[in-house]
């Protein structure tokens, strides 16, 4: 059976989740749900990155002396948020967990045993705690500031362990060349190739031990560099160092979904680490874009981070999922505004989808065993093919566009056939012949919506009297005419009530 092991970044717990984190997690959730529905054996992983110095700073800023208590509380908050947003992750990894630490220690020892892979050296340079990343002078903003966090970087000079990443440059470039799908979208691929070719240097992979983080095996005076530790979550969650059989079952990762901000870590450092350990490399890394809020960067100092839970209280989970994935082509950058969310809620969801379902339900209320017929069949089948290929390419906003195009075909069909002019009593068979294809098209629309807006899709299946649809294998059910007997009823409440 085909498998899909897919991941989100693991998030820092120095703050609560905002809409940007929800975006990456929703996208991964859609891909996971699509895979499961198509019968793919799926393992969807997310989690929290807890060994960072910025979490220590956040604990202090929140008046918490016990850093572990702080990260426990924050990690629980992240998990709860994903539950409330209906995220269907199969596991949640914490980098403070015993299973993670055990795997990290094993990995370090494995690479340390490779001649020349890890060596001791002195690091002199610039460091941003916000990014947990080293900088070159030429990459900084004026005033020696980190371009992302706009805080002055630290000048450090310390004895560290280094990972000889430079010796994997050629192997990495060959892997990228031989696997055109490794880095997506293609623009990111070029960016990584340029980076690996010109800038991939040995990495410092430890810092002086300040009492937080995973100590270097055999040298307690140092802790493992947080990115080196964090990237390993993708292995430790599936049993590396603790459950070899599980690891064999899921490795390698099929898809990492990450923001464009962390592509170098995922497409250069991470694969170099795996090459050193002799492990298979991830099949795909998809870098999504960033969005601003009302044209401004999401930032702590601006205080403009939007809590996804607050949005969901007003609009519902499905509307928020829909909006984020529809508004910004996946892979590109975009802007978020409440006005546009509200506008799309009205036009696409309440008027578009909500009305269509209501119209069909009202016209065909109480009808059973409607014949799918052939009208609309070819066109809907064509849309299904486009939808599946968009989903395979992770072109999520395109897939949604295709669904809405299908709805417009349905609206047009209803206008042409004008079933309201046909008497259900005296012309029963003619009426059924017009409404049957409509119900069938709606069933297939509900299937296409299942990964994106699962609650709404379920409500549509219920309107069609198909209570088991959406759980069975889509590969069979997503064909024109595959419907089991429908029984149409009016939804107890509108799918998207006017706000
Ligand atoms: N802990 C690291 C990742 C380690 S993975 C081994 C980290 N964490 S983070 O909490 O800063 O989350 C970063 C991710 O959140 C981004 O890569 C992106 O997926 C998401 N986003 C954060 N802000 C965002 C926007 N403004 N817009 C879209 N996505 C955003 O980096």
Image: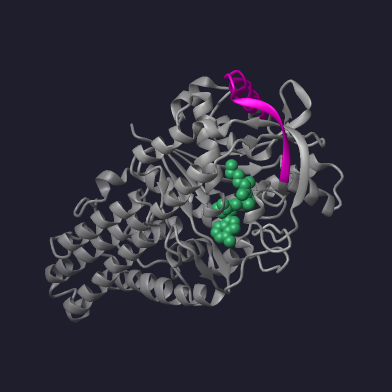
Decide whether residue 115 is among the magenta residues: yes
Residue located 67% across and 69% down the image? 304
Q: Measuring from the top left, give residue 333's x and y in whole percent.
A: 49, 64
Left or right, 12 with reference to 2: right
Q: Is residue 342 visible?
A: yes
Left or right, 182 with reference to 140: left
Left or right, 173 with reference to 195: left
Residue located 66% across and 26% down the image? 119
Q: Is residue 385 above or below residue 202?
A: below
Q: Nearer the viewer, residue 140 or 244?
A: 140
Residue 412, quarter of picture: bottom left
Q: Measuring from the top left, give residue 411's x and y in whole percent.
A: 26, 74
Q: Nearer the viewer, residue 319 or 440?
A: 319
Residue located 14% across and 66% down the image? 433
In the rendered structure, which segment of residues is drawn in magenta?
101-125
Q: How many marks?
A: 0
The N terminus - image quarter:
top left
Protein image colouring: one colour
């Amino acid at each position: 059976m085909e498998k899909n092991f897919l991941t989100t970044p693991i998030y820092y717990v120095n703050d609560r989740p905002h809409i940007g984190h929800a975006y990456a997690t929703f996208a991964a959730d859609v891909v996971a749900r699509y895979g499961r529905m198509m019968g793919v054996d799926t393992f969807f992983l997310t989690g929290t990155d807890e060994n960072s110095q910025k979490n220590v700073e956040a604990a202090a800023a929140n008046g918490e002396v016990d850093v572990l208590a702080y990260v426990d509380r924050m990690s629980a908050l992240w998990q709860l948020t994903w539950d409330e947003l209906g995220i269907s992750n199969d596991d949640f990894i914490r980098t403070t967990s015993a299973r993670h630490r055990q795997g990290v220690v094993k990995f370090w020892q494995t690479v340390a045993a490779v001649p020349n892979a890890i060596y001791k050296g002195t690091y002199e340079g610039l460091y941003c705690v916000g990014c947990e990343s080293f900088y070159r002078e030429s990459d900084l903003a004026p005033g020696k500031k980190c371009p992302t966090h706009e805080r002055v970087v630290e000048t450090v000079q310390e004895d560290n362990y280094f990972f000889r990443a430079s010796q994997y440059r050629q192997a990495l470039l060959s892997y990228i060349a031989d696997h055109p799908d490794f880095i997506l979208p293609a623009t990111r691929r070029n960016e990584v190739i340029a980076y690996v070719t010109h800038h991939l240097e040995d990495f410092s992979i430890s810092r002086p031990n300040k009492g937080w983080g995973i100590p270097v095996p055999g040298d307690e005076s140092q802790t493992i560099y947080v990115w080196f530790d964090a990237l390993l979550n993708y292995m430790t969650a599936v049993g590396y160092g603790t459950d070899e059989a599980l690891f064999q079952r899921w490795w390698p990762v099929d898809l990492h979904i990450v923001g464009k901000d962390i592509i170098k870590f995922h497409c250069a450092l991470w694969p170099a680490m795996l090459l050193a350990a002799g492990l298979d490399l991830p099949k795909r890394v998809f870098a999504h874009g960033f969005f601003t809020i009302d044209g401004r960067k999401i930032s702590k100092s601006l205080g403009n981070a939007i809590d996804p839970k607050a949005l969901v209280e007003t609009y519902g989970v499905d509307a928020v999922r829909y909006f984020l994935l529809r508004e910004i082509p996946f892979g590109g950058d975009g802007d978020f505004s409440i006005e546009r969310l509200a506008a799309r809620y009205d036009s696409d969801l309440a008027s578009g989808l909500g009305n269509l379902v209501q119209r069909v339900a009202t016209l065909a209320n109480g009808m059973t065993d409607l014949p799918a017929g052939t009208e609309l069949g070819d066109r809907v089948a064509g849309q299904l093919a486009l939808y599946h290929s968009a989903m395979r390419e992770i072109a999520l906003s395109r897939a949604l566009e295709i669904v809405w195009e299908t709805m417009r075909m349905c609206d047009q069909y209803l206008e042409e056939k004008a079933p309201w002019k046909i008497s259900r009593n005296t012309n029963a068979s003619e009426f059924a012949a017009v409404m049957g294809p409509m119900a069938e098209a709606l069933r297939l629309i509900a299937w296409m919506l299942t990964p994106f807006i699962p609650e709404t899709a379920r409500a549509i299946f219920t309107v069609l009297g198909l209570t088991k649809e959406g759980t069975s294998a889509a590969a069979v059910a997503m064909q024109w005419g595959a419907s089991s007997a429908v029984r149409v009823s009016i939804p107890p409440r509108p799918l998207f009530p006017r706000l």
